[in-house]
Image: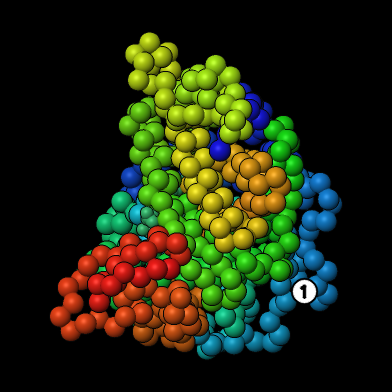
């Protein structure tokens, strides 16, 4: 994955990360946030002003919180499109307002979408702003008003819940309503405290529909019922993510962006990517683990493969190796480290290049390959270890994404997931590697709302399914037989024992869980 340029690039990254932070702040690149956003335990209490002040400090820009493209682009084409009689928003995009009184179609408020992941829970809250009808206002319970006020007046909830104010989307269309989308996250490990907090805010008294996706929608279903008397309506996490991406991108012309000069290690300029002709594209969702999806058209995608070496691996290994306590701390350490003190390069083995197979001497031959020598172990810093861990995980994901893109003949690769949060090093490395190894044919595309698409898509699924009264996987019925899993293709034999099937993609052959026969994909 690495070349001499990658190596130099990584080196420079380490040295110049602080400089980057400063320069991107000057160019209003909102997604680069100062480190130190350390989370601790979520308490069932409000932080109020103090927390909001802490959060405000992390913003790179007070007014136009989503205008990272405006000053950072090279082509000058950035900004809201000319959409005629629409409202232009402070956050850089526009939507047509609803005419007249708001339509009351859709499930009862409040509208939440929740993605309960292996590491982080993402919550989106939709606040209608298209003018409440008198009837709606009368119906609104005091509890609901209080919850709305509580969510909106804080940027931190307890010690670990955070509202990502810089991602807020105003005048966004959801179903037949328009309003503001708020983005909130907290560690999934704090779910018990979150449920107690929700209970203390009166959620149990609201007969509302809560839709949820992610593995935790299944894992915590009983807890939601027991603690807050809520029945979860569950939706598939990958359906939700794809729909969330398409909807957010549709509402925000600057959602997608790419590095203008991925081959130039000193140029951090980003440009909005025009995603109006999207198909086919690859989605690499880097969460705790990694899922890679090939999207051929609307409601036509397939999970091609995945890897367990993802964001959770980076964080877990970093905590073990450096004693750090949070993702933010791990990223801050990595920014000051040098992975070459940890990794063994081709030239460490060959004394130079391995020319026959085009391997430059500066390519990493073996990640962490120096660490078997006690003298070298004695010399590495915590930062070097953090940097090497980040580079190892990132390069591995990039390498798998490249192989999948090439084998499926797909040129656009969307990288999403919270691993990329405040993680300029990985984004830059992915952009560089994709470009370098494909001779510029593959484009790495990043999205502003990184890890929130599942939660947005989940709320959309609720609206699509009317009152959300039944669990459904929205695209299930549309899957072609090629996309279906063995169990879906073959109806279970009456006496079939359930045998796990690992679906790692089209080239894999596996055994059908139902009939036991070998299947080629
Ligand atoms: N504040 C944070 N706390 C913990 N991890 C964070 C934080 N910010 C970013 N991360 C990174 O994001 C990853 C989780 O990303 P994401 O929320 O997209 O996945 P998830 O939904 O929890 O996991 P999965 O989809 O595999 O169930 C973590 O493993 C870590 O690398
Ligand atoms: C299990 C999920 C889908 C949960 O989001 C994710 O963590 C993942 O895709 N992990 C990688 C699993 C694999 O090895 O394919």
Q: Which image quadrant: the C terminus?
A: bottom left
Q: Position of residue 340 (x, y in %)?
A: 51, 22
What kind of element bears circle 1?
Answer: loop
Q: Position of residue 341 (x, y in %)?
A: 48, 19
- Residue at 51 percent across and 24 percent down: it is 345
Q: Which of 5 and 278 is in front in this view?
A: 5
Q: Mark 1 points at which residue?
A: 86
Q: Nearer the viewer, residue 104 or 501?
A: 501
**Would you place residue 233 above or below residue 430 in this image?**
below
Q: Is residue 356 visible?
A: yes
- Residue at 33 percent across and 45 percent down: it is 41
Q: In this view, does 213 lie to the left or right of 446?
A: left
**Would you place residue 191 above or below residue 21 in this image?**
below
- Residue at 54 percent across and 75 percent down: it is 300
Q: Which image quadrant is residue 199 in?
A: bottom left
Instruction: Check the image and name the residue furthest to the left.
Output: 495
Q: Which image quadrant: the N terminus?
A: top right
Looking at the rendered structure, the number of numbered marks drawn on it comes to: 1
- Quick one: label 1, few (<14), some, or many (20+) residues within 10 Å? few
- Residue at 21 percent across and 82 percent down: it is 493
């Amino acid at each position: 994955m690495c070349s001499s340029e990658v190596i130099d690039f990584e080196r420079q990254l380490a040295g110049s990360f602080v400089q980057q932070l400063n320069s991107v702040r000057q160019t209003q690149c909102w997604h680069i946030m100062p480190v130190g956003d350390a989370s601790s335990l979520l308490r069932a209490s409000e932080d109020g002003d103090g927390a909001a002040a802490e959060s405000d400090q992390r913003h790179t820009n007070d007014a136009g919180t989503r205008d990272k493209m405006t000053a950072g682009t090279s082509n000058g084409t950035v900004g809201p499109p000319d959409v005629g009689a629409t409202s232009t928003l402070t956050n850089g995009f526009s939507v047509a307002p609803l005419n007249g009184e708001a339509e009351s179609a859709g499930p009862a408020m409040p509208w939440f979408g929740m993605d309960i992941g292996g590491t982080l829970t993402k919550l989106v809250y939709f606040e209608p702003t298209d003018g409440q009808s008198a009837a709606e206002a009368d119906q609104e319970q005091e509890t609901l008003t209080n919850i709305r006020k509580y969510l909106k007046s804080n940027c931190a909830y307890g010690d670990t819940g955070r509202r990502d104010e810089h991602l807020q989307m105003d005048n966004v269309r959801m179903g037949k309503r328009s309003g503001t989308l708020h983005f909130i996250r907290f560690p999934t490990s704090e779910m018990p405290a979150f449920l107690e907090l929700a209970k203390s805010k009166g959620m149990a008294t609201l007969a509302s529909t809560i839709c949820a996706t992610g593995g935790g929608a299944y894992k915590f279903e009983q807890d939601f019922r027991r603690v807050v008397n809520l029945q979860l309506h569950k939706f598939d996490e990958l359906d939700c993510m794809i729909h969330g991406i398409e909807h957010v991108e549709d509402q925000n012309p600057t959602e997608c962006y790419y590095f203008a000069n991925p081959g130039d290690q000193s140029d951090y300029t980003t440009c909005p990517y025009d995603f109006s002709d999207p198909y086919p594209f690859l989605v690499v969702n880097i969460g705790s683990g990694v899922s890679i999806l090939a999207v051929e058209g609307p409601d036509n995608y397939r999970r091609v493969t995945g890897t367990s070496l993802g964001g959770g691996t980076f964080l877990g290994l970093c905590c073990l190796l450096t004693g750090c306590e949070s993702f933010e701390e791990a990223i801050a350490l990595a920014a000051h480290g040098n992975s070459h003190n940890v990794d063994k390069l081709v030239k460490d083995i060959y004394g130079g290049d391995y020319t026959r197979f085009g391997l430059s001497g500066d390519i990493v031959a073996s990640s962490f390959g120096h660490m078997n020598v006690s003298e070298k172990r004695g010399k590495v810093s915590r930062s070097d270890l953090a940097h090497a861990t980040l580079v190892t995980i990132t390069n591995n994901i990039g390498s798998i994404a490249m192989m999948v893109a090439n084998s499926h003949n797909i040129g656009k690769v969307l990288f999403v997931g919270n691993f990329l949060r405040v993680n300029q090093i990985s984004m830059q490395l992915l952009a560089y590697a994709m470009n370098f190894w494909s001779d510029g044919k593959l484009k790495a595309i990043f999205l502003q709302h990184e890890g929130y698409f599942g939660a947005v898509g989940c709320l959309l699924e609720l609206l699509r399914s009317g009152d959300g009264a039944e669990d459904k996987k929205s695209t299930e019925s549309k899957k072609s037989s090629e996309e279906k899993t063995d169990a879906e293709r073959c109806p279970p034999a009456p006496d079939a024992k359930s045998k796990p099937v690992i679906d790692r993609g089209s080239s894999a052959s596996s055994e059908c869980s139902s009939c036991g026969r070998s299947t080629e994909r």
